[in-house]
Image (tube, helix red, strand yellow):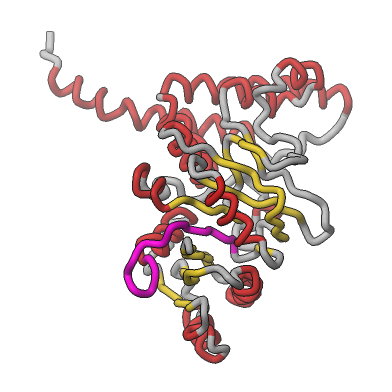
Amino acid sequence: MASVLSIILNWRSHLMTLRAVEAALIALDGVEGALIVVDNDSKDGSFEALSQTVVARGWDIGPQRVRVLQSGHNGGFGAGNNVGIRAGLPDGSRPDYYYILNSDAFPEAGAIKALRDHLERHPKTGFAGSFIYGEDLQPHRTAFRFPSVASEFEAQIRFGPVSKALRNSIVAQPVPELTQQVDWLAGASLMMRAKVIETIGVFDESFFLYFEETDLCRRAALAGWPTDYVLESRVMHLGSVSTGMKEWRRIPSFWLDSRLHYFVKNHGRAYAFAATWAHLAGGILWRGRLLIQRKEPGDPPRYLRDLTVHHMGAAWRAVAPRRKFNRKTTPSA
């Protein structure tokens, strides 16, 4: 029977993480494997509390043996999950599948097994993710297309005719009504074929938070391993518990870093420059309409300014060493 190593990353939310572990253990009934909780260097007593609770509840000797690991360094979402991936099963062997579950996500009974069974039935599929819904039972949009210059413009201009013309470039797709192939899925509940991870590598730890699963799914797709959205796997997700995204007053630098790194890594600096200016152009046009309509833009304060300053700063850092070198080596007149 194919084995699954489940990984839950904790950062300063150990009570929520324990709820996720409990739900995961129920969903893992009948699935061979183990579960790892990685504390991402919370430094708030989370590691100790998690370790003690796992032993007190007997999870450390159950059919799905639960281990609590300490990352030792908060390198972000991808780096923390990589700790669990590299640890492997308790006996040191490699599982057939890795399953990533957010600490604020709660799979229904059978949800994890549904992902494993889907990948078993579709040996050419690399990753599989769940249907995600909120506490209000409303579905979340978690199936996406890969970002592009066109999608950056469309997302910011927020104008019906443009969205219609660029409908095949819109990143956030409507919630699929059937199990189907997509470009990439949010990492709240994502199962990955171990063979694929061995081929393409683990999460890129240059991403602290956001875009890491986008990059991973793209690398898998380029290697011939597509990603599937599996409607039969249902998971409730609170969202933004650890990241605080709903309370952002300014766009954080780690989001800007991740966005820029994704475009530069996957498409080059020229393309990243074009994507940023398409984003800014759409945002400026949107704000021009809002001046007439007297409405708020709906973005964090100073969003476009922060994006511009960040990108130009990154561009300067990329060329500054070369400029310095040229000054030293160019003969004086």
User: In this view of the protein, can residue 297 be seen by the observer?
Assistant: yes
The spot of residue 113 in percent (x, y) is 61, 61
Residue positioned 57% across, 30% down in the render: 147
Residue 93 covered by magenta stretch: yes
Compared across the picture, whether 154 is left or right of 38 comes to right
The spot of residue 47 in percent (x, y) is 48, 78
Compared across the picture, whether 20 is left or right of 193 comes to right
User: In this view of the protein, can residue 37 be seen by the observer?
Assistant: no
Q: Residue furthest bottom?
A: 56
In the image, 152 versus 81, the foreground residue is: 81
Judge whether 222 appears above or below 65 on screen. above
Judge whether 218 appears above or below 61 on screen. above
Residue positioned 57% across, 51% down in the render: 187
Residue 326 covered by magenta stretch: no
Q: Quadrant of residue 16?
A: bottom right
Look at the image and tell me in which quarter the C terminus lies.
top left
In the image, 260 versus 330, the foreground residue is: 260
The spot of residue 182 in percent (x, y) is 61, 36
Q: Residue furthest top?
A: 333
Compared across the picture, whether 299 is left or right of 261 comes to right
Judge whether 8 appears above or below 258 on screen. below
Judge whether 162 appears above or below 251 on screen. above
Residue positioned 71% across, 39% down in the render: 299
Magenta span: 88-102
The spot of residue 130 in percent (x, y) is 65, 52
Number of marks in the rendered image: 0
Residue positioned 46% across, 28% down in the render: 312
Q: Main secondary structure of the magenta part?
A: loop
